[in-house]
Amino acid sequence: MNLEVDVSRRLGAFTLEARFTTDSGLTALFGPSGAGKTSLVNIIAGLLRPDRGKITVQQKVLVDTERDVFIPKHRRRVGYIFQEPRLFPHLTVRQNLLYGRWFTPARGRREQLDHIVELLGIGGLLDRGPALLSGGEKQRVAIGRALLASPHLLLMDEPLASLDEARKSEILPYIERLRDESRVPIVYVSHSVSEVMRLASTMVLLADGKVTATGTVSEIMGLQDPE
């Protein structure tokens, strides 16, 4: 398994209890607002400590409370794409992209700039500043920056939530290509049925802080396999 999660965390009156395993491809964390999706990805990223549990990515233990193991976020090799692109406004697209490589030792750098630029279709944007980019272009650059850090796992927390329908339609094919061509497993947070049905290889259903089901989209949604 590429990702194994078994954690719990109390957040005020809310308790998150999540356990699932997933392989490569795109795993969607799906559920209504307040289900615990963002809290869960923050725990995986190292932004929150679980009260109890263990997280393993590609056989590397990131958290194990029984053994007092907690790898800090900057050493986890986990890329995080937020709802907002969070690009550096004073840097060009090229400089924003290359910023991600600084956090990875040279021997651990798998991804090359040319490959990521081609994968995301941003070759014509390299010399522009973020202020001259559309919302969809900014998000593609943010994805590229995360990939150039050569992460072992990519977290995407509702990356299309701030985009209008035209910009969503623009970026969805690139996320599909990333899912199909990248070697990096992806955890994708969404409460959009259409996004999940289009993108997800595996689906983890969350409700009230609990994982209620894990499986393929067709299994979770009760759809029939067309074959």
Image (cartoon, grey):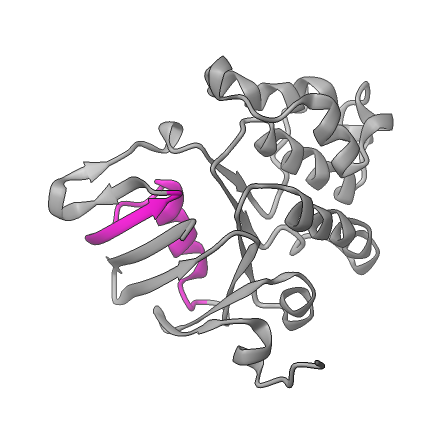
Q: Residue 92: in sight, yes or no?
A: no
Seen from the viewer's position, the closer of residues 88 and 222 is 222
At 58% from the left edge and 73% from the top edge, which residue is drawn? 217
Question: How many numbered circles does the render carry?
Answer: 0
Residue 34's spot in the image, x, y percent?
43, 67
- The residue lying furthest to the right in this view is 124
Quadrant in the rendering for residue 206: bottom left
Q: Is residue 41 magenta?
A: yes
Quadrant in the rendering for residue 15: bottom left
Q: Is residue 48 above or below residue 207?
A: above
At 66% from the left edge and 70% from the top edge, which residue is drawn? 197
At 44% from the left edge and 60% from the top edge, which residue is drawn? 37
Residue 208's spot in the image, x, y percent?
37, 73
Q: Which residues are magenta?
A: 34-58
User: Is 83 positioned to the left or the right of 211 in the image?
Assistant: right
Seen from the viewer's position, the closer of residues 88 and 153 is 153
At 38% from the left edge and 33% from the top edge, which residue is drawn? 76
